[in-house]
Image (cartoon, grey):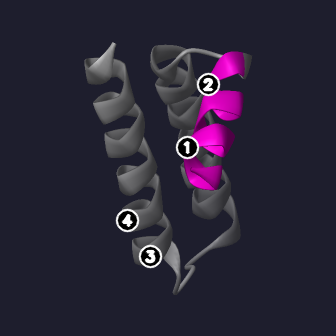
Amino acid sequence: MAYGQQVKALFELSSPAEMVENLWEIYSGFVNFEKQTGYNPRQANLFLTFRELMLFCSRIEAMK
């Protein structure tokens, strides 16, 4: 129940679709930064986390 309340509070700030757009902007900025700074050994893990957040937001949007 506590997780559900936290998710509800999160999506009261912006819709799942808006959250997906924001996540893309954040990830795109990260990728551009990585190109300038060089190799990051955690890049694959960061992408997987990003992907899971995107999928989560998509599933929440589909519930509406």
Label 3 to label 4: alpha-carbon separation: 5 Å
Q: Are marks 2 and 1 in contact (CB under 8 Å)?
A: no
- First in sequence: mark 2 vs mark 3: 2
Query: Of helix, strand and loop, which mostly describes the magenta segment?
Result: helix
Amino acid at the residue labelled 1: Gly
Q: How many marks?
A: 4
- Percent across and percent down for residue 8 are 61, 30
Q: Is residue 3 above or below residue 10?
A: below
Q: Are marks 2 and 3 in contact (CB under 8 Å)?
A: no
- Percent across and percent down for residue 32 are 60, 48
The mark closer to the camera, 2 or 4, is 2
Is 8 magenta? The answer is yes
The residue lying toward the viewer, choosing from 40 and 55, is: 55
- First in sequence: mark 4 vs mark 1: 1
Give the labeled residue for mark 4: 48
Q: Are marks 3 and 4 in contact (CB under 8 Å)?
A: yes
Give the labeled residue for mark 3: 45
Report which quarter residue 55 is drawn in.
top left
Label 2 to label 1: alpha-carbon separation: 11 Å
- Percent across and percent down for residue 23 are 55, 36
Please name the residue shown 65% across and 16% down the image: 14
Q: Is 61 on the left-hand or right-hand side of 45?
A: left
Label 1 to label 3: alpha-carbon separation: 25 Å
Residue range corresponding to the magenta coloring: 1-12
